[in-house]
Image (cartoon, rainbow, N blue to C red):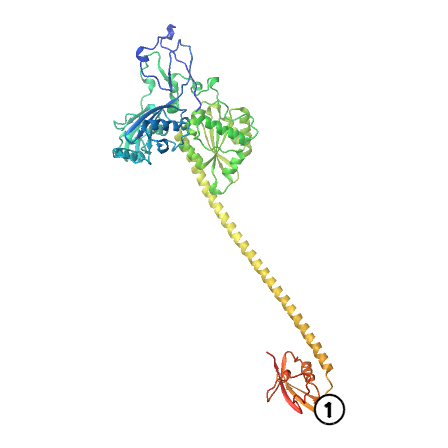
Amino acid sequence: MIAVCLVLLMVTADAAAGGAVPPPSSSSSSSSPPSSSASAFCPLNSSSRHIVERQPRMLNFRVEYRQRTVELVLEEGSTVGEIKQILETELGVPVSKMQLKGWKSGDVSDSTVLRSLHLPKNNSLYVLTPDIAPTASTSKNSALQESLNQNFLLVISHRETQRDYNLNFPGSRTIQEVKRNVSDLTNIPVRHQQWEGWPASASDDSMTLALSGISYPCHHLSVCRRSSPANAQEPTEECADVHMISDSEGDDYEDASEFGVDDTEMFGMGSSSCRKSPMMPENSENEADALLHFTAEFSSRYGETHPMFFIGSLEAASQEAFYGKARDRKLLAIYLHNDDSVLSNVFCSQMMCADSIVSYLSQNFITWAWDVTKEANKARLLTMCTRHFGSVVAQTIRTYKTDQFPLLLIVMGKRTSNEVLNVIQGNTTVDELMMRLMGAMEIFTAQQQEDIKDEDEREAREMVKREQDEAYRLSLEADRKKREAQEREEAEQVRLEQMRKEQEEEKEAIRLSLEQALPPEPNEESGEQISKLRIRTPSGEFLERRFLGSCKLQVLFDFVASKGYPFDEFKLLTTFPRRNITQLEPGSTLLEAKLFPQETLFLEAKE
């Protein structure tokens, strides 16, 4: 956290007399020293101003382990590992077997600096050693550790508003932490809260709920605002302890005027020696580099627990938030910081770093930030807003004065344009900020559901169209394949027909040549030995011809082939006895084959 410099003007009761203020009484000097967040001094006259230098902030820790309690005081610059090393000496438990629990931010590493955890002044922790078996004497401590892990329901009645709050807290939460949470809900600072219902044993605000003696699982309490301290009797001492605003007392800032402190001095703005480095460099050429610098400076000032700022241009942040799938869209939160506003430190430390706000923004928003402290950066922002959201938004930002900053703009993307749902100013509370964020989220959710419905219907139509297009494409593909197969089949038929035709032409040519080569048929009156043959074809027809008895069988085979029955496809058989003439020597004569003077033969296809 950035140290807060406080310039305090105190006017003594005898200022009119112009005399020196007497020193503090011995009873005051013998009293216990003031806390690290306080400084005691005596002004010399009514017009004197004294700068109270901040001492290193000290944190008190009450650590419980089984039946032992160890109280520690460390600077906030110490680390968690240093606490464990001290506990190792006090408890005799090795650091490697020690688990330090009770941190409000969850488990932390040994290298974590206490300052980064934003702890109150008084803290309660407990040690777990699961690797070290408890002895019989530690059975009571086992019950204590169990109660630390239990959840207590506190029913807290706010008497002034007649409203009840049902709050769940783990047993490890301290009474101080409960009161600070109630302060966020009721807007009553912790030191102005008046409680009823706490048991008598709950005398220390640093005590955990498990040790406070409240009823389990439910305990009833009531709270209201006590009388204003301004009405209380003025202190008689002319020299008093003045408490600076620290992390543990940050909820009391609204009453700083009771001490006569100027606002600019209260928030560290009144002294040039306390001037912070700029949140964002002026005239940065690259928006991403400017946002990286902003995030690093924000973490340096207010700790690592803060919203995750989008690193990139406003246009890129809008694209990320508005132009994805409807289910993935988010609201855009634009945080505008101004170091010249007295509200900036409180808004950042109390609102933007609150766990509930950080979690809600991270889950539901894209958070983009910009620093408008410098006029050049503000002009650049207005140009970006005009480009992306229109001149109305830019003009709206111009109307806000410096002391109304910081601003948190909630922007929702619509079909045709982007709409600013809300502008949250710096003078708000955690509860009000959360309610306004939730209100914007309700509007966005209703619009998102419509967008999801429209998108689903559009996707369904597109799906049907894609299915129809795919079916049409498959149909065309099937038709194409069918046509190609038909074309191939037709081409094959043409080819086979061509081959058949060629074969027939070839056979016909052979037949004609055989027919022309046959010797003439002899006359019956020629006086030579004539053999008259009658040949039955497979179709039942008969071929008749006369041959000279001296003719070779080859002449008979050529005759049969000239009639369309080639020698290699058909065989020539006698009727009785059955003989295969085609197996005889083609050079034999008809007489030798005993086909004289006449014979009936038949043709049969070869197998």
Residue 314 on image: x %, y %: 53, 33
Callout 1: helix, strand or loop? loop
Q: Residue at x 66, y 91 (%)?
A: 598
Q: Quadrant of residue 229?
A: top left
In this rendered view, identify the residue nearer to me: 452 or 514: 514
Left or right: where does residue 237 sit relative to residue 272? left
Q: Position of residue 141 (x, y in %)?
A: 28, 33
From this view, report whether residue 42 is shown above or below residue 282: above
| Label 1 crowd (10 A; few <14 / some 14-19 / many >=20) | few
Looking at the rendered structure, the kind of residue marked 1 is Asn
Name above or below for residue 314 compared with residue 483: above
Task: Residue at 44%, 34% (x, y): give it.
Answer: 361
Q: Position of residue 264 (x, y in %)?
A: 45, 19
| Of the pair 427 and 199, the residue shown nearer to us | 199
302 left or right of 144 in image: right
Is 17 placed left or right of 201 in the picture? right
- List the residue tagged with mark 1: 523
Seen at 56% across and 33% down, the residue is 387
Above or below 473: residue 22: above
480 or 132, nearer to the observer: 132
Query: In which quadrant will I find the N terminus?
Result: top left
Can residue 427 be seen in the rendering of this structure? no
